[in-house]
Amino acid sequence: MPFLGQDWRSPGQNWVKTEDGWKRFLNEQSNYVNEINSYCKKEEYNKENILHSTNYNIAAKKRKKDLLNSKAKIKYLPQEKWIYVHKGSTKERHGYCTLGEAFNRLDFSSAILDSRKFNYVVRLLELIAKSQLTSLSGIAQKNYMNILEKVVQKVLEDQQNIRLIKELLQTLYASLCSLVQRVGKSVLVGNINFWVYRMESILHWQQQLNNIQITRPALKGMTFTDLPLCLQLNIMQRLADGRDIVSLGQVSSDLLVLSEDRLLWKKLCHYHFTDRQIRRRLILSDKGQLDWKKMYFKLVRCYPRREQYGGTLQLCRHCHILSWKDTEHPCTANNPESCSVSLSPQDFINLFHF
């Protein structure tokens, strides 16, 4: 049914003859105005309203565009720091929770600032870069790159975890190289030229990490080498990565002797691997003893190492809510802590394999 205004020749508009000719006015109040002065006033009023609304719409569109623009440094702001994880639709709950949605809403930007959660987030970024990058939505991929940039900047400022981030960037660059070659199969969201730009950014970050110069803090007092040998060895036993022990042994001749301690490498092997795995990779030294150092690096190539993090994501088995360990969620259980299960980075990704 057509819409007819007060003037049947036009939909809700009035035409008024003025000295400058016929002009059209919007009739918002559904009444006629007979005097020409009132029409002039209304014309000025409408112009101001239209101009104000136009400027408002342009500003709103610009803010929205800047928020979605990958070049903007504005992070994705989640409403809550927890999400429901469900794999099917019910009468009470519709739709699915995807990996991209979880990555956007769990506030990983703030998590990287926490030293307890930093390694967890980096490991998660590495796993996503290996096989799950195409599972992220467009906004999730932009958020992924923004978080990665913040991680690199944090490492450049703190001068810590350099090797960890180098491995992450190398894994991501290798995955992007293989995905860009398959551009005809629509495996990446967005323009291919923009992904090439992101790859150039990764190369730039790698160069920055390679050129980093670790400065020694100007501290007065006791250093690590001033401690008794038993305390130095006790501290080295707290290192979970054998490459850190090797690097520490290159500092001085005394630390080199401690880094070759058989008991140190034996505890490291039993920490990461089971007895059955160790028995399959026995290596004897020239003296007929077990070479635990060589066994460790051989076991690392064959089996995954044990992962342990200070801050992890937890899944509530009662209400199926995924959140950080130190984040409260609206759980109806009598004892919510007993219902929470810590998730490794791989377990987190496995939740979204439908």
Image: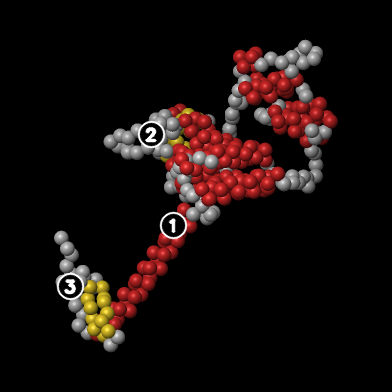
Residue carrying label 3: 9
Which amino acid type corresponds to the residue marked 2 in the rendered image? Answer: His
Q: Earlier in the sequence, mark 1 or mark 3?
A: 3
The quadrant the C terminus occupies is top left
Residue at the spot 44% in from the left edge and 57% down from the top edge: 64
| Distance (Cα) linking label 3 and label 2 | 56 Å
- Specify whether residue 228 is in view: no
Crowding at mark 3 (Cα within 10 Å: few <14, some 14-19, many 20+): few
Tag shown at residue 348: none
Where does residue 117 sit, x and y in percent of width and height?
Answer: 57, 38
Residue carrying label 2: 86
- Specify whether residue 288 is in view: yes
| Distance (Cα) linking label 1 and label 3 | 39 Å
Farthest residue to the bottom: give it: 19
Which amino acid type corresponds to the residue marked 1 in the rendered image? Answer: Lys
Residue carrying label 1: 64
Q: Nearer the viewer, residue 221 or 162?
A: 162
* SS category of the residue bearing label 1: helix
Q: Earlier in the sequence, mark 3 or mark 2?
A: 3
> How did the renderer colour the structure?
secondary structure
Where does residue 101 sit, x and y in percent of width and height?
Answer: 44, 42
Residue at the spot 21% in from the left edge and 69% down from the top edge: 11
| Distance (Cα) linking label 2 and label 1 | 30 Å
Which amino acid type corresponds to the residue marked 3 in the rendered image? Answer: Arg
Residue at the spot 69% in from the left edge and 20% down from the top edge: 295
* SS category of the residue bearing label 3: loop
Residue at the spot 55% in from the left edge and 38% down from the top edge: 178
Where does residue 266 sit, x and y in percent of width and height?
Answer: 70, 20
Q: Nearer the viewer, residue 196 or 101?
A: 196
